[in-house]
Image (tube, helix red, strand yellow):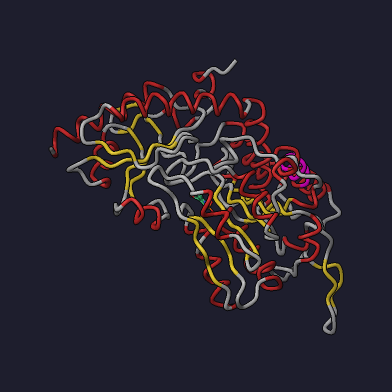
Amino acid sequence: MFDVNKIRAEFPVLQQQVYGHPLAYLDNAATTQKPQCVIDALCHYYERENANIHRGVHYLSEKATAKYEDARQKVRAFVNARSEREIVFVRGATEAINLVAASWGRVNVRAGDEILVTELEHHSNIVPWQLLCEQTGAKLVVAPINERGEVVLGEFERLLCSRTRLAAISHLSNALGTINPVKRMIDLAHQAGAKVLLDGAQAAAHLGVDMQALDVDFYAMSAHKMYGPTGIGVLYAKENILESMPPYQGGGDMISMVTFEKTRYNVLPYRFEAGTPNIAGVIGFGHAIDWLTSVGIESIAAHEHALLDAATQQANGFPGLRLIGTAASKSGILSFTLEGVHPHDLGTILDREGVAIRAGHHCAMPVMEHFGVPATARASFAAYNTLEEVDALFAGLEKARNIFV
Ligand SMILES: Cc1ncc(COP(=O)(O)O)c(C=O)c1O
């Protein structure tokens, strides 16, 4: 049984007042809050288990190593990867994408090749490919979106060709909430002989993700958007592809033998985890996955959808409000502008009412350009948000309208 009050009680940060109002945290696409079990796991690690992993023979090191590797198994199960060798811990979705561009891109992309992205992408899924194109002479090709903020599938299909080495696609748009038909896009790209990277930074905590069912080649995630700590994320990659990739960074733990003449690299996934990793972050992430699994991703998705429906209904009746992003398939993100009020002013006024939203380009400037706006206001929902908070958002907007219009 999904009980939002019970869930809220697990998040200490939500128990506070902001400017005399109960905090309504609606900036979850930027980062989610952390449940007590994740906070406790971080404290417990530093209080009782802190040691460097993999190389130690003492009690604490073995314990920390076991916890770290246990978290890898949890991630593997959560995304239904075939093997833990396919789960590489990185700093976040940004580093996961940069790893693929730097390592896989270095040996697989040449002058004249193409990387296909969509107009929906976060800068993290644009700039690494631009850098790769600059280094190799490859070309960045962009599949357009329509007026609802959906990728035009026919155009995506038309732009795939024998030169396409990789399609890099967001699973769920952070700026608009659009859920892309990724299975169809993966199948189309594979038919054209291209590999596919999905940017799952927004999707992983809101939609069920299944690596084997998707048959995706690369998948990028950030723990901090999944109720876990900052500074940790995952690159999922198919084992045979990871095996073929050169190391991303050199250093400790990614080697099996080093001499000045020749270095032999470690087995997967350690070959891609050079240096001391964010051990506490990984362990905390494991607890966040336990938490997500215990609540149930389907229940969370249904709850967030109900919040989105209620918010969309209120938005449609709100004078001067323009929804940016009205895709048929959407997750709990409401991006909008209000006539006569700059999104940053909206953000400030709502903040004084205790309502935290985001205002800006959401690291998706091409999306803003498509809709002819410099910025939007964005409310994004998570498991702990309530219908009362949706009402607080619209009460704040009413206040802003009275001030400015
Ligand atoms: C769609 C999308 N991709 C990538 C990222 C980058 O994630 P991180 O900053 O955690 O690396 C974000 C973060 O907002 C995002 O929303």
Q: Quadrant of residue 148?
A: top left
Give the vertical position of 292 relative to 111 (above or below): above
Q: Residue 154, position in %: x, y? A: 53, 50
Residue plotted at (62% across, 41% down): 42
Residue plotted at (66% across, 72% down): 109
Q: Give the range drawn in magenta.
A: 69-75
Quadrant in the picture for the C terminus: top left
Q: Residue 22, position in %: x, y? A: 35, 26
Q: In this view, does 242 lie to the left or right of 188?
A: right
Residue 119 vs residue 274, the one in the foreground: 119
In this view, which residue lies farthest toward the top? 1
Q: In this view, does 262 lie to the left or right of 213?
A: right
Residue plotted at (28% across, 42% down): 337
Q: Does the magenta stretch include residue 193?
A: no
Main secondary structure of the magenta stretch: helix
Q: Residue 141, position in %: x, y? A: 52, 64
Give the vertical position of 257 relative to 220 (above or below): below
